[in-house]
C-alpha cells in the first residue's frame, strides 16, 4: 500500500483546515507534521497546540516528525494533542530504546528517523519495535530542498534487513520527494511518502494542489506495481 503523507509545512497556514481537506480529497492518506525547535535544526515551526488544531481538522493518521532536542520531554504533550505516530531522530536520542518505549506507552506508534549522514546500522537493535523508519532524503530543517540520491541505497538496505529479520516495519522517505524522484524510492522499497512542496500549490490554488497530489500518486503507484 502506497501512502501519500502530505507535509503541511508547505501548506497555506492561513487556511490550514482547507489545505488539509484538499490534500485528503485528492488522495493523501497521512498528515505529516514537521516540528522544529531551532536547536536540532536551524528553523522553528510549531508544537503541540498546532498538532491539536490539525487533529480537529482530520481523522487521517498524524505522523509527527520531531526535529527537536530532548524529545522525551514532550512525548506526553504530543500524545495529549492527538498524535498517532511519533518519529524521533536517532541523532538526538541517547536512550533510543527508552524513548521509543515511552512513545508506545503513551498510546502512539513509535518511529525513528536518520539524517543523510547517519548509517542504517545504527538502527538494527530497535527495528523490531518501530512502526516505521524514516530515511531523510535531505538534511532536515526546511521544505523545498533537493533530493540526495545517495540516500536511496539506505532504503534498499532497510528493505533487505526487514526481509532478513522477518519484520514488518514500514519505510518512509522525506525531503525532495516529487514526481521525478518518487519512482526511484518506491522501487527501492519505500511506501510511506512524505511530500510538501510537490503537493501544495500555494494560497487559493486548490485545483493545482489536487492535480499535484493525483499525479504524484499515479507515478508512485505505477512504480509500486512494477516493483510488486
Ligand atoms: O522534514 C522535513 C524537512 O525537514 C519535511 O517533511 C519537509 O516538509 C519536506 O518538504 P519537501 O521537501 O517535500 O518540500
Ligand atoms: Fe518531515
Image (tube, helix red, strand yellow):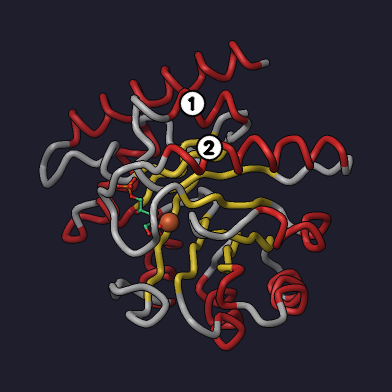
Q: Earlier in the sequence, mark 2 or mark 1?
A: 2
Residue 53: x, y in percent? 37, 67
Q: In the image, is 97 to the left or to the right of 183?
A: right
* Callout 2: SS: helix
Name, please, the residue furthest toward the bottom: 73
**76 to 193, vertically: above or below:** below
Name, please, the residue furthest toward the left: 204
Q: Which residue is mark 2?
A: 152
Could you tell me which quadrant the C terminus lies in? top right
Identify the image quadrant of residue 49.
Answer: bottom left
Residue 97: x, y in percent? 77, 73
Q: Is mark 1 within 8 Å of ligand 1?
A: no
Q: Residue at the spot x=34%, y=25% of the render?
A: 180
Residue 184's label in the rendered image is 1
Q: Residue at the spot x=59%, y=74% of the render?
A: 79
Q: In the image, is 6 to the left or to the right of 153?
A: left
Amino acid at each position: 500500500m502506497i501512502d501519500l503523507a502530505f507535509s503541511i509545512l508547505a501548506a497555506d497556514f492561513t487556511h490550514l483546515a482547507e489545505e488539509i481537506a484538499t490534500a485528503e480529497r485528492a488522495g493523501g492518506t497521512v498528515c505529516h507534521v514537521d516540528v522544529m525547535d531551532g536547536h536540532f535544526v536551524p528553523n522553528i515551526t510549531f508544537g503541540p497546540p498546532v498538532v491539536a488544531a490539525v487533529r480537529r481538522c482530520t481523522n487521517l493518521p498524524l505522523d509527527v516528525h520531531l526535529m527537536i532536542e530532548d524529545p522525551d520531554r514532550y512525548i506526553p504533550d504530543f500524545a495529549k494533542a492527538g498524535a498517532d505516530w511519533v518519529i524521533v531522530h536517532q541523532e538526538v536520542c541517547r536512550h533510543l530504546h527508552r524513548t521509543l518505549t515511552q512513545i508506545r506507552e503513551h498510546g502512539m506508534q513509535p518511529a525513528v528517523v536518520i539524517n543523510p549522514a547517519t548509517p542504517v546500522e545504527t538502527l538494527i537493535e530497535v527495528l523490531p519495535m518501530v512502526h516505521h523508519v524514516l530515511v531523510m532524503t535531505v538534511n532536515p530543517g526546511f521544505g523545498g530542498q533537493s533530493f540526495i540520491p545517495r540516500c536511496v541505497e539506505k532504503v534498499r538496505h532497510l528493505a533487505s534487513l526487514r526481509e532478513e529479520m522477518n519484520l514488518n516495519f514500514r519505510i518512509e522517505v522525506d525531503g525532495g520527494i516529487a514526481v521525478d524522484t518518487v519512482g526511484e524510492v518506491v522501487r527501492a522499497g519505500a511506501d510511506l511518502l512524505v511530500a510538501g512542496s510537490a503537493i501544495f500549490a500555494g494560497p487559493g490554488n486548490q485545483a493545482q494542489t489536487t492535480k499535484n497530489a493525483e499525479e504524484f500518486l499515479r507515478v508512485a503507484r505505477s512504480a509500486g506495481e512494477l516493483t510488486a
